[in-house]
Image (cartoon, helix red, strand yellow):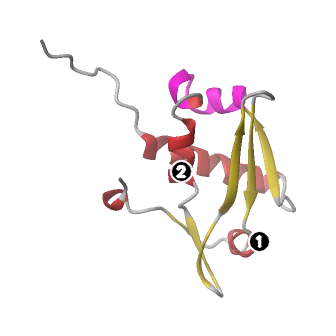
Amino acid sequence: MSLDYTHKPNYFMFAQLFIRHLQNYFEKHPDAQNAIFDLRDIYELFRQDKASATINLDGIMNIADEYRLETLQGDQKLISRYAIDPQNNSLLVDFNREALDSLKQSKAILPPDATLQE
């Protein structure tokens, strides 16, 4: 008996959606050093894919925290730390100051290499 999976989540697509969401967030909050997102908003961002907004969120964030920006000190990660808080239904994200400064200067965000991911 063989069971084929009909739904394979695309973690890289959801990580890209989250990074674009962060870009929009920084346009509205240019002085932010961290952010708290309600998991219901993440659920809507991921087009109501419940698995991606819950059980798969850590895997998606592991990819999202590999996005980098070119800085004077070399390429640096945009996200310095994240934590999923299921009790408060929130996602806490801390940002790298140098990377944020580069983002404000409209430098391009460098995605992780999908061929190197495990």
Q: Report crowding for label 2: few under 14, some 14 to 19, many 20 or more residues within 10 A (C-alpha).
A: some
Specify the amino acid type for callout 1: Arg
Residue at the spot x=57%, y=22% of the render?
Answer: 48
Q: Is residue 67 left or right of residue 82?
A: left
Residue at the spot x=57%, y=47% of the render?
Answer: 61
In the rendered view, would you say 66 is above or below 53? below
Element carrying mark 2:
helix
Q: Report crowding for label 1: few under 14, some 14 to 19, many 20 or more residues within 10 A (C-alpha).
A: some
In the rendered view, would you say 45 is above or below 19? above
Report the magenta residues as a range. 39-52
Q: Is residue 61 left or right of residue 8?
A: right
Kindly tell me whether residue 17 is visible in this rendering. yes
Residue at the spot x=83%, y=61% of the render?
Answer: 33
Q: CA distance from mark 2 to mark 1?
A: 19 Å
Q: Is residue 49 rendered magenta in the image?
A: yes
Residue wearing tag 2:
62
Quarter of the image for residue 117 reads bottom left
Residue wearing tag 1:
97
Specify the amino acid type for callout 2: Asn
- 5 vs 105, nearest the viewer: 5
Q: Is residue 19 rendered magenta in the image?
A: no
Task: Provide residue 75's location: percent of width, then percent of height.
Answer: 56, 78
**Residue pushed farthest right?**
31
